[in-house]
Amino acid sequence: MKKEHGFTILVIIVIWQFLSMTVNNDILIPFPIEVLKDFSDLFTKNVFYSSIIATIYRVLLGFLISFVIALILAIIANRYKLFRNCFEPIQILAKSIPNISYIIIVLVWLGSEKSVSVICFLILFPIFYNNFLFAMDEEPQELKDVEKIYPESFLELTRVKTIPLLLPTILSTSKMAFGLGFKVSVMAEILGQVQVGIGRQLYIARQNLDTTNLFAWTIVIILLCFIIDWVFDQFINRKKHGG
């Protein structure tokens, strides 16, 4: 963490402390020290770990399915123009539907427990597909010329050319998509009132007007997103340095 980041966090905590002292109502703005205490208490509870595991499992499932299907369809669309043109209306429709519409519609169709991963898939798929297709469209002309001179099978081209070409886009898009999928999945858990998950804990805190616990779980979400970004940054940096 940079020194500037630490300074910014300190300023936020000072402002938070000032506001909580001014309002003096822990339902509206709890004191930072109380939130920190509640946050540390979470680590002693089994529900803390089961909630995180359940939410991450749902996110991973939706993330992986959307990634694999988008990658396959983008490669086919790049190779076969007829398929690309036929699929384009679905692509436009998928990226135009508001996220909240996806959440509500899928919750009505599937119920709470099965819907979170499906919602994650529906929201992440257009992001993966569009980014993969754009990256392949930007392929250098030199590579296209070599492909014409030395033609290979579709599968061989995918293995030796397309996947290596897409790798930087795969890493950068995955970093952004996983963070978005995590936040959307938590929102879906809250609206769907799942039995186990981070969203469930936020819903309970809201029902009990326990803003301190709500803030504590929000810190958990922020830290998890930070860890996810850090992990992807390690892969991206290794790729940049030829690792």
Image (spheres, rainbow, N blue to C red):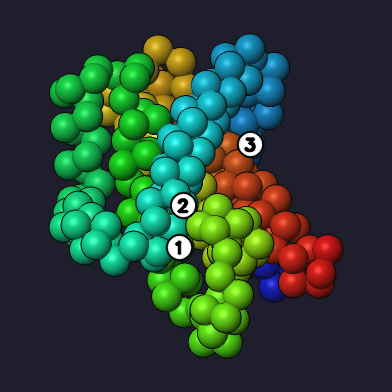
Q: Do the CB atoms of the residues marked 2 and 3 lie less than 8 Å apart?
A: no
Query: Which comes before the other along the chain, label 1 or label 2?
Result: 2
Label 1 to label 2, Cα distance in Å? 7 Å
Above or below residue 113? Residue 27 is below
Residue at the image point whose x is 29% and y is 66% from the top: 81
What amino acid type is highlighted by mark number 3? Answer: Leu
What amino acid type is highlighted by mark number 1? Answer: Phe
Residue at the image point whose x is 60% and y is 75% from the top: 150
Query: Which comes before the other along the chain, label 2 or label 3?
Result: 3
Which of discs 2 and 3 lies nearer the camera? The answer is 2
Residue 96, visible in the rendered structure: no
Badge 1 local density, few (<14 within 10 Å), some, or many (20+)?
A: many
Residue at the image point whose x is 46% and y is 52% from the top: 71
Q: For this view, does 163 lie left or right of residue 27? A: right
Helix, strand or loop at mark 3: helix
In the image, residue 123 lies at what x, y percent?
A: 33, 46
Of residues 19 and 10, which is closer to you in this image?
Answer: 10
Residue at the image point whose x is 24% and y is 62% from the top: 82
Residue 33, visible in the rendered structure: yes
* Residue 71, disc: 2
Of residues 242 and 223, which is closer to you in this image?
Answer: 242
Badge 3 local density, few (<14 within 10 Å), some, or many (20+)?
A: some
Which of discs 1 and 3 lies nearer the camera? The answer is 1
What amino acid type is highlighted by mark number 2? Answer: Leu
Q: Quadrant of residue 9?
A: bottom right
The residue singled out by tag 1 in the image is 132
Q: Do the CB atoms of the residues marked 1 and 2 lie less than 8 Å apart?
A: yes
Label 2 to label 3, Cα distance in Å? 42 Å
Query: Which comes before the other along the chain, label 1 or label 3?
Result: 3
Helix, strand or loop at mark 2: helix
Q: For this view, does 2 lie left or right of residue 134? A: right
